[in-house]
Image (spheres, rainbow, N blue to C red):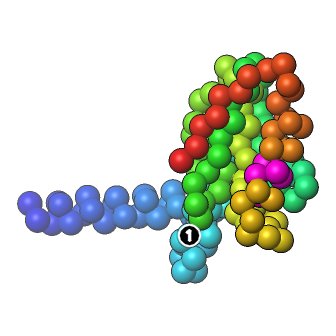
Amino acid sequence: MKRRTHLKRQAYRQSTMGAVLAMGGVGILRGDPLRYAWSFRRNQLKRHARQGFYKGLSYFVGGQGKPVVFVHGFSDHAGSWADTVAMLSEQCRVIAIELPGHGDSIDPLSDDFETLYEGFEALLDLLVPKHEKAILIGN
């Protein structure tokens, strides 16, 4: 019985390793799991939204309909919304914004909150017309 359990575990490990390698997870084996997870989530997001840049801020836009804006949390990136964007992009226009200094957005020249807000506000004015109301989601 123990031998059978051992064989099942070994088969599971081999199939899991095969799946990781098939998804391009060689970075995990080289000792950089966070970089792999970061790029994997961003690639998932890019399947449903196209990336753009405005005044140093990176953003992703996809789908059509009522705009839904996603803002990630501290020390994260827009890829954290990949699953949600995938689900909602069929019904809504999804916009995932990367804050200054995160993801592909440039580092802010100033730590002044008003300066950061002005860039964010300008990007929203560009992506969401004045006559539309957007749903804002953040973490």
Find residue 68 and report its image quarter.
top right
43 up-or-down from 109: above or below: above
Q: Residue at x 70, y 23 (%)?
A: 92
Residue 115 position by quadrant: bottom right
Identify the residue shown where x is 54% and y is 71%: 33
In this rendering, does residue 85 appear at all?
no
Task: Please name the residue shown 73% across and 69% down the image.
Answer: 111
Q: Is residue 30 visible?
A: yes
Q: Amino acid at mark 1?
A: Leu
Q: Residue furthest bottom?
A: 31
Residue 44 is situated, as x and y percent measured from the top left of the image, at 66, 47
Instruction: Kindly state the secondary structure of the residue where label 1 is placed.
Output: helix
Q: Please tell me which residue lies in front, 58 or 20.
A: 58
> What secondary structure predominates along the stretch shown in magenta?
helix
Residue extent of the magenta highlight: 116-120
> Horizontal and vertical percent for residue 42?
68, 53
Residue 32 located within the stretch drawn in magenta: no
